[in-house]
Amino acid sequence: MAVFNLNINGKKQTVDVDPNTPMLWVLRDHLKLVGTKYGCGIAQCGSCTIHLSGIAVRACVLTVSAVGNQEVTTIEGLSENADHPVQKAWLEVDVPQCGYCQTGQIMTAAALLEQNPNPSDSEIEMAMNGNICRCGTYTRIKKAVQLAAESNNS
Amino acid sequence: MSLAKTKIGRRSFIKTTSLAGGGMLLSFNWLISCKLTPEEISTLPKEWFKLNGFLKIGDNGLVTIMSPNPEGGQNVKTSMPMIVADELDIDWNDVIVEQAPLNTDLYSFQFIGGSQAIRRGWPGLRMAGATARQMLRKAAAQAWQVPVEEITTNAGKLLHESSGKSVGYGEMASAAAQIEVPEEVELKDVNNFKIIGTSRKNVDGPKIVTGQPLFGMDTHREGMLIAMIVHPPAFGLKLKSVDDSVARNMPGIKDVFTVKVFNDGYEKTFFDTRTFNEVAVIVGNSTWEVMNAKKALKIECEPIESSTESRDRFGRKYKETTPAGLESTNDHYAQMEAMAAKPGELRRKDGDPDAAFKRAAKIVESTFTAPFLAHNCMEPMNFFADVNDTKAELIGPLQKPELTEQALSSRLGMPVENIDIKMTRLGGGYGRRSYAHWLIEAALISKKMNAPVKLIYTREDDMTDGIYRPAYHAKFRAGLDSENNLIAFHVKAGGIPESPLAANRFPAGAVENYLAEDWTIDSNLTVGSFRAPRSNFMASAEQSFLDEVAEAAGKDPIDFRLELLDRANKNPVGENNDYEAERYAEVIKLVKEKSNWGKSDPGIHRGVSAYFCHNSYAAQVLDIVIENGMPLVQKVTCAIDCGIVVNPDSAVNMVEGGIVDGIGNALYGELTFNEGIPQKNNFDRYRMIRMSESPKEIDVHFIKNEIDPTGLGEPMFPPIFAAVANALFKATGKRHYNQPFITEKALVG
């Protein structure tokens, strides 16, 4: 066990855990931030996507000891009032079915638009291909990403 | 407007005992972790008045509607309350939706599966709204001393035209709660619906996009422990001994033991599993610690012996055999070929198929196969349990809570009254969560630990624990006369371990000489419902085969289907045909029109398919292009007849998703076995469809009619497999008989 001082959603958080613990379980078990989802544990499904210094990463394979003082953003910290352009677009298009993968999809999409505010269809597909939606809402996810990009650029 | 008795089946849907008859204390949401938004708190009424089990009205006019069924992504949590709200005649903006707990006194059919939630819920939901509206009208009539017939309603207001009196529901709610539940109520004319048929957004949308705790996996309770299982690595093995010498002493580990899901001699019902009845359990403080100890736990297994047990399917007894042995996929296919070469069980015979095939000018014959599939819900199986000797509290995602409660009651020896099952949102179901053995495991673990416990399956546990879509096989023969009329049709279908055949479905009824047979092969792999069970294979095989027959007859595949349906409509062969030929033809005609069937664009290859299942009709045209040797779906046009559509945009979402799901499974879905061991246990090897592989466009059209709603969760799924196969044929000139169409070794073609 070791003590880690983390910077999560703009707040200092201290946890005392095994240094190999993935951030996924630090967030879910220790900090009760359960919007970051467990799907596969091997970085294949994207359900656990968070931002590490603004980059989309899979929290299931990111150990707590690798984070250091980098800024971590989870879905709970993406916006104050569910008003991030990506969240608004998700609601406007009414994307979710079961909804389990959607926080990971939103975090991937938000990081994409941060780096590429005006992505082409194939750039959207490339960025979003790491996130599985078992319900098959891909056409709506793409529509919502396009809508968020448009609202950002208008 | 129509009158309806408020009694459905064996019980009144509204128990008078459920009437609170006055101010109910505020009990907002049982899932304590779901916090109210500030807006919700500021607008909440001081008092709620419960008019029946489905709704309560606040003194300020807000209405809370209970959504009775579990929510697994089909959006019933929005669409079921919409039906109540419409009959109640309330503004949808004044509605708060709550998930109802399992309560068999108050609600019927509290399950999701078989595309039944809306279909079965429809009459009860309408009556819940209509009786409450009637009670409000009566209360107003009494207060104003006028005949009840003179009281009208409009969007949450009671009105008396001649006197000009008007009052909101909230002000009359207290008096209405004292009114006796009417024995008969007026239901709206379907043309007067104001909410049904309009698109309303997912009521959980804001919570989903902000990551609030909605799912079973998110359940937390003070002092809660985490549990995981270790099951035998192969089907055909059972637990012999557990070596916990290392695991037990690892950090954070509380205990290691074994649990038996069902006691010996228990008669399993249809939705009980026989998968790995005994499993090892590790309990500890945190998920990561338990995951680590799980890797260090050693189990020894031994072969199972063959057994046959009696089971109960809703009162009907049947035998199920579990053979010993370690099964492999290659053997399965050889066994299926052997069974298909022998006569099967006769399921339907019209005319004289033998004679017709003898005189046929042309015979088309093809064989289709499909593999086992894993459900792969994105939320792995899990459940929360807090159980002691006298009572049990369970929280989590499941599809058939009433049946699971009975199984748990039997296992714990505890009356159902002492068991409280609360339903969270399901992170996917697709049939997998109908088999809630993990709930029983969680309950047994909690009881043993005397503590609240959350049981979590890892993805690997989830994928290797059984309840798969069965493997199937179907052999078809069609006989055409010299004028290319279909004069004989023969289907022989089977599977491991169940038959997919529905002998009375199309093209039964459309062919003079028809023969349907089937067979089964016992297996110790466990299977279960998977989105549109059986249909999901039969549609793919039959609709591919019909395409092939149309080609042999030199006919357009749509014209060929319509010709057969015309025959089935005007002069049906045999009895018990379980589809309406006219409605079936209508969806095909609609998809023909909407897809501009017949136009040809260079490089675009089109396939058509249609099917009837779960009381609804679906037809699809799928367009693909081939890029770098791989098929890319450009567009799917889909026509559906599912009766009245409650929430159109949400229904479109459902259809889009089912189409993507079907394309994914047709192209990539497969679970193979070697010596009883599943050959894939996570998404690195189990290929799931991804965004770049899903259709660029999906265009959905519903038939407009006034038929009570039928199923929508499944009917779009089965036919799309064949639409893919038929488009691939156009693209490559090669028929695709064996799913998945794209394997690791070979590209398409």
Image: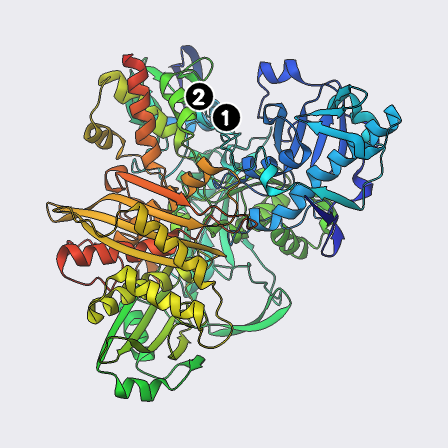
Return the residue at label 2. A16
Amino acid tagged 1:
Lys
Q: In the image, B32: left or right of B506?
A: right
- The disc placed on residue B596 is none
Instruction: Write down the quadrant of residue B500 in the picture.
Output: bottom left
Q: Nearer the viewer, residue B255 or B489?
A: B489
| Mark 2 Cα shell of 10 Å, populated few (<14), some (14-19), many (≥20) | few
Could you say whether the residue bearing mark 2 is in a helix, strand or loop? Answer: strand
Residue B329: which quarter of the image? bottom left
- In the image, is residue B65 above or below residue B731? above
Q: CA distance from mark 1 to mark 2?
A: 30 Å
Check the residue under mark 1 and report the chain it is in: B
From the viewer's perspective, is B104 left or right of A152? Answer: right
Residue B689 relative to residue B103: left or right: left
Q: Quadrant of the C terminus of chain B?
A: bottom left
- Determine the residue positioned at 23% across, 77% down: B483
Label count reads 2
Most foreground residue, B458 or B9: B9
Where residue B327 appears, as percent x and y from the top left, is 34, 68
Camera sees residue B527: no
Mark 1 vs mark 2: same chain? no
Q: Is residue B152 visible?
A: yes
Three-letter residue code for mark 2: Asp
Query: Residue B175's quadrant in the figure?
Result: top right
Question: Residue at label 1?
Answer: B207
Residue B408 horizontal/vertical position (percent): 64, 53
User: Label 1 crowding class (10 Å Cα cut-off): few <14, some 14-19, many 20+?
Assistant: some
Image location (x, y in percent) of residue A141: 34, 31
Assign the N terminus of chain B to one quadrant of the image: top right
Residue toward you, B702 or B630:
B702
Residue contact between numbered discs 1 and 2, judged by CB atoms under 8 Å: no
